[in-house]
Amino acid sequence: MSGTGLLQDVRRITVLQGSFHVSDAEDVVLSTVLGSCVSICLFDPAISMGGMNHFLLAEPGEGHEIDPLKQQLYGAFAMEQLINEMLKLGASRSTMRAHIYGGANIHQAMARIGSANARFARRFLEDDGISISLEDTGGSDARRLDLKPATGQVRCKHIATADVPRNALPPMRAVTRTPVGDVELF
Amino acid sequence: MGNITILTVDDSPSMRALLKHALLGQGHEVHVAEDGLCALDWLNRNIPDLVITDINMPNMDGFGLIEALRSQDRYRDMPILVLSTESSDDKKARAREAGATGWIVKPFDPDKLAAAVRRVTH
């Protein structure tokens, strides 16, 4: 996975909060804008396929009720979805490479959230045996992130928070879109 | 239903923690394993009332675990629930053929999980 180059003439897919996308199409670019949220970019050079997720919070706090409708905004679910989809399409933990982006501490009151998100992502990848080849987290800038999944090419542009247009941050995915906890007994 | 002993099998430490948190909150005794092989190792020494397993795991996946358990007399009738981000019909059919009792899609709803646990262990 490399971090250079402008990406033009492409089909751009925005990765919203609580969602993920995996592709090996050469004309696809996965994009998002991050504040305290974190995105993981995965790339497996063995099959020229990559993916990106975008999560809002690391984990439920100690003793917090687990809100099923918000569970997909948590890192554990976002990480598992992305990794499982990569594995399902032929990727391997041993050849995948990860980049971690985001986790900015934009507001004083949110300082813990950005750092906790980045720390969570690092620990999850280490526990999962996936190599982290680049980490660009923390600070107080928002980040505009583009991943070309077929090549692993990444562009991460820092944006001073004051310069982020109000509509630049991708909206939260409608959390009711995914059926939550559907049960089927055989 | 009284409190029961549940083995949860998932390769994600965070998902194990989430699941354990939810099941402990429902009053059950919860044990965790990180893949099918670790689960079999624990199950050679213990017999729970229920196993809840992920599908995509290293070393031994959920399908392999279910087949291995169903090949043993003492686990022939024990309920086994699959808890997975996957929800395709072919994966569900494969789990059913392997001997799974049911399928729950992640992210799980703690109330639906509790109801499913009650139904399969009643």
Image (cartoon, coloured by chain):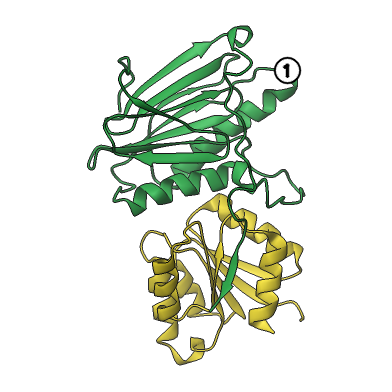
Q: Residue at x 39, y 73 (%)?
A: B94
Position in image of residue A110 (x %, y %): 71, 24
Q: Residue at x 42, y 51 (%)?
A: A84
Q: Residue furthest left?
A: A46
Question: Residue B25: which quarter of the image?
Answer: bottom right
Can the viewer see residue A67? yes
Q: Nearer the viewer, residue A68 or B41?
A: A68
Question: In this image, A132 relative to A16: left or right?
Answer: left
- Residue at image mark 1: A108
Question: In this image, B39 relative to B107: left or right?
Answer: left
Q: Residue furthest bottom?
A: B73
Position in image of residue A186 (x %, y %): 53, 79
* Up/down of A139 relative to B22, above or below: above
Position in image of residue A93 (x %, y %): 34, 47
Position in image of residue B66 (x %, y %): 44, 76
Where's the N terminus of chain B, which quadrant? bottom right
Crowdedness near tag 1: few (<14), some (14–19) or many (≥20) residues, C-alpha within 10 Å: few
Badge 1 amino acid:
Gln
Q: Residue at x 70, y 69 (%)?
A: B114
Tell me which chain appears green.
Answer: A
* Up/down of A182 relative to A46, above or below: below
Q: Colour of chain B?
A: yellow
Can the viewer see residue B37? no
Q: Nearer the viewer, residue B36 or A17?
A: A17
Label 1 chain ID: A
The number of discs equals: 1
Where's the C terminus of chain B, which quadrant? bottom right
